[in-house]
Amino acid sequence: MINYYKILGVSEDADAKEIKAKYRKLAMKYHPDRNPNDKKAEEMFKTVSEAYEILGDENKRKEYDEKRKNKRNSNNSQRFDGKKSSRAEQNSESAKRGAEAFFRNFSANPNDIKNMFESAFDVNNMSSSDKDKMREHKKSMEQSFENFFKPKKNK
């Protein structure tokens, strides 16, 4: 789940005035008119605007705070705009955010790649019928990973 408080740089107990002030400052900094042809600034502007849309609205903020506390306890959750969302939409959005975050911070470091595989094959979040198969698959993938990055011995 995206941490909108962190995006705006405010604490969770920040009042509406502080949230609005931080949003305006960041919106001015990343506004597309001030940063023409800068895709990163444009994405930051969208992210900051999304954060303010949630935290700047008292009802949406309460819902957001509740969802943060009850993270993934409900299979029939709602989006922050109040509309029902299907499980497929939720998974798609979650995967998109995860991929964006991953590639934003990606490096060719072997540990990054290993972490990618660990999160992709997280056995704890699977049904019990799939856990055994995935454990075996995970072992196989880890071994492949280790072999791939193992330095070759010169003869």
Image: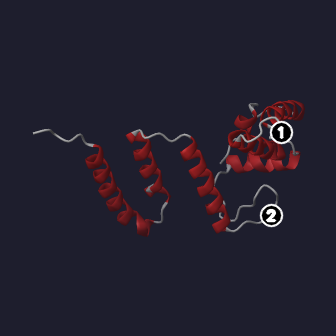
Q: Which mark is residue 110?
A: none
Identify the coloring: secondary structure
In the image, 125 versus 40, the foreground residue is 40
Callout 2, which amino acid? Lys
- Residue for point 36% across, 64% down: 132
Above or below residue 137? Residue 25 is: above
Q: Position of residue 107 (x, y in %)?
A: 47, 39
**Can residue 73 be spotted in the picture?**
no
- Quadrant of the image occupied by residue 25: top right
The residue sitting at the right extreme is 17
Where residue 76 sits, quadrant-wise, is: bottom right
Q: Secondary structure at mark 2?
A: loop
Q: Position of residue 16 (x, y in %)?
A: 88, 35
Residue placed furthest toward the left:
155
Check disc 2: other Cα within 10 Å, few if <14, some if 14-19, many if 20+.
few
**Total numbered circles:** 2
Q: Position of residue 155 (x, y in %)?
A: 9, 39
Q: Earlier in the sequence, mark 1 or mark 2?
A: 1
Residue 122 location in percent, x, y? 45, 54
Amino acid on which disc 1 is placed: Asp
Closest to the observer: 146 or 122?
146
Residue 40 visible to an observer of this rendering: yes
Is label 1 in a helix, a strand or a loop? loop
* Snapshot quadrant of residue 149: top left
Q: Which residue position is annotated with label 1?
A: 33
- State the residue at coordinates (41%, 38%): 109
Mark pair 1, 2: CA separation: 32 Å
Give the side of residue 112 with respect to residue 31, left or right: left
* Point 65% across, 48% down: residue: 1
- Label 1: how many Cα within 10 Å (few below 14, some 14–19, many 20+): few
Q: Which mark is residue 83?
A: 2
